[in-house]
Image (spheres, helix red, strand yellow):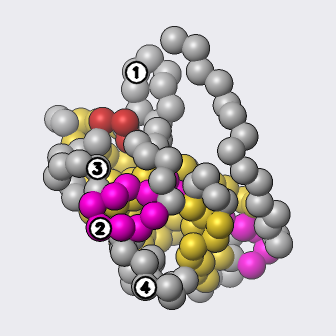
Amino acid sequence: VSRSLVECGTAQMENDIACLSLGSIGSHGNDEEPAAESMEVDGASPSSPTSSGAGFATGAAATMLAIGTWSDATVRMLALPSMQVVAQTALGVDVQSRDLLIVRMGVVDYLLVGLGDGTLLSYELATSSTGDQDSLFGAARRVALGSRPISLSTFVSEGQTRVFVSCDRPTVI
């Protein structure tokens, strides 16, 4: 199977990008885990989008790009393929994000943010747009997992998407 990377749009960010994650939020057609969001043994992408739409209509999936920046400690969500910033939130910390992961666990979409100090932030993602840029992000939950930078990856266990959190104290979510 031949795969290629195709540029679908560009966007200029005000600050340097520290990390990014590509994923789909919203309906995946059913309440089960989408297989495309898991890491495949054959080396396929760990986060393959299921739709190229950028809308937030109920029942529709939206392909999003989460971007963490170095200097202002924010995360921006860009709709693809338009590359339009649809949401932004300040992390409220003095430490930079080192890894991001858009992941569906159960029937809920999350944005996980691994920080450089071993802290993991999680945001439940809303799937309807109210025009407010903060409305996509639910309240941040914070857990200190270690003291070293966090790296995030998905895998499937017993048919469920799980997240491996790599740091000085590895954890599975």
Tell me how far mark 3 sits from mark 2, CA to CA: 11 Å
Q: Quadrant of the C terminus?
A: bottom left
Residue 117 located left or right of residue 162: right
> Upstream in the sequence, badge 3 or badge 1?
3
Q: Which residues are magenta?
A: 55-72
Tell me how far mark 2 sits from mark 1, CA to CA: 33 Å
Residue at figure coordinates x 54%, y 83% from the top left: 133
Question: What's the mark number on residue 28?
Answer: 3
Residue mark closest to the camera, 3 vs 1? 3
Question: What's the mark number on residue 58?
Answer: 2
Question: What's the mark number on residue 41?
Answer: 1
Q: Where is mark 4, residue-wise?
A: 130
- Residue 20 x/y as whole percent: 63, 54
> Upstream in the sequence, badge 3 or badge 4?
3
Looking at the rendered structure, the kind of residue marked 3 is: His
Q: Are marks 2 and 4 in contact (CB under 8 Å)?
A: no
> Upstream in the sequence, badge 4 or badge 1?
1
The front one of 111 and 128 is 128
Question: Does the rendering let one see residue 171?
Answer: no
Q: Secondary structure at mark 3?
A: loop
Question: Does the rendering let one see residue 48?
Answer: yes
Looking at the rendered structure, the kind of residue marked 4 is: Thr
> Upstream in the sequence, badge 2 or badge 4?
2
> Upstream in the sequence, badge 3 or badge 2?
3
